Image (cartoon, rainbow, N blue to C red):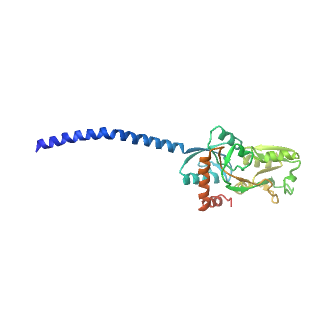
């Protein structure tokens, strides 16, 4: 009985060693495949350029120190839908397109109008949301601003890098144009009289005044947007694969109502 057990163990050991030699190449292949898969996952992590000064689209929450708003929520929904990960890269508005050109970011997710000039450098997704500019004035200013014609001879505050700047410059009747990196800075200067009025995205101004009322400021009640446009996310010119991924995600979010739910959450209905 003892001898039979010894022989069985010996045969088992030889068999195991043989199997080890046979399976070793397959184990290596499996390991290589796992590493290749890990590389694929890593390649699907994108750096996303965005701003931090445009409530309700994007803003830095001081409590959590995280970028919040409609844009980050939409980017998260797209990532969940299309199975990729991302990292938000806070940037000045006027540095977003240069950043995508140098490869610092792969996606721009910000309240950026789709324009012919910008489409020469980046490829935009389908339109996400359409709106126009709002006009901010001092609360005791009795001027009835209705259009850009009423800005003649005024000092006008605008966001750095916005399409509004060139439009006003071409008019030739604006006294001075001041640019600002954030709507908060613009609102402060209008309140202090350093700028007569401010032109900014209407949803941003309205949200700011609703969240932080300022007795010295008001939205011009009769002003009608002259420069409405649609915003979209964008990728580097020619990156058709990533663009398709974003557009497919937007299609899905529109069809099942998730996009509308996000617009409603951030008072952008």
Compared to residue 65, the image places residue 142 above or below, namely below
Residue drawn 62% across the image and 41% down it: 105
- Mark yes or no: residue 14 visible: yes
Return the residue nearer the eye: 214 or 184: 184
Image quarter (top left, top right, bottom left or bottom right) of the N terminus? top left
Return the residue nearer the eye: 245 or 232: 245
Return the residue nearer the eye: 79 or 240: 240
Residue 217, position in %: x, y?
78, 54
Q: Residue furthest left?
A: 1
Image quarter (top left, top right, bottom left or bottom right) of the C terminus? bottom right
Return the residue nearer the eye: 244 or 206: 244
Q: Is residue 117 left or right of residue 149?
A: left
Q: Splitting the image into 4 quarters, where does residue 12 fall?
A: top left
- Mark yes or no: residue 65 visible: no
Residue drawn 40% across the image and 41% down it: 31
Residue 261, position in %: x, y?
62, 61
Q: Splitting the image into 4 quarters, where does residue 210 fall?
A: bottom right
Residue 44, position in %: x, y?
54, 45
Q: Is residue 185 left or right of residue 43?
A: right
Q: How many marks?
A: 0
Residue drawn 61% across the image and 55% down it: 250
Residue 192, position in %: x, y?
80, 47
């Amino acid at each position: 009985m003892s001898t039979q057990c010894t022989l069985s163990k010996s045969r088992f050991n030889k068999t195991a060693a043989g199997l080890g030699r046979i399976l070793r190449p397959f184990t290596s292949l499996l390991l290589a495949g796992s590493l290749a898969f890990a590389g694929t996952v890593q390649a699907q992590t994108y750096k996303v350029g965005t701003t931090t000064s445009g409530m309700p689209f994007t803003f830095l929450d001081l409590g959590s120190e995280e970028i919040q708003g409609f844009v980050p929520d939409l980017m998260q929904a797209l990532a969940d839908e299309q199975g990729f990960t991302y990292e938000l890269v806070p940037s000045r508005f006027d540095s977003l397109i240069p950043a995508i050109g140098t490869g610092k970011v792969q996606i721009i997710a910000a309240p950026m109008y789709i324009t012919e000039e910008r489409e020469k450098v980046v490829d935009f997704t389908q339109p996400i949301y359409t709106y126009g500019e709002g006009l901010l004035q001092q609360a005791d200013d009795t001027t009835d601003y209705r259009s850009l014609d009423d800005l003649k001879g005024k000092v006008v505050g605008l966001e750095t890098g916005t399409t509004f700047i060139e439009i006003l410059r071409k008019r030739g009747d604006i006294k001075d144009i001041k640019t600002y990196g954030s709507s908060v800075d613009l609102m402060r200067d209008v309140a202090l009289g350093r700028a007569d009025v401010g032109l900014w995205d209407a949803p941003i101004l309205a949200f700011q005044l609703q969240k932080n009322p300022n007795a010295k400021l008001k939205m011009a009640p009769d002003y009608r947007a002259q420069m409405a446009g649609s915003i979209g996310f964008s990728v580097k010119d020619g990156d058709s694969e990533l663009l398709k991924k974003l557009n497919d995600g937007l299609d899905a979010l529109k069809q099942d109502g998730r996009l509308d739910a996000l617009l409603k959450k951030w008072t952008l209905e």
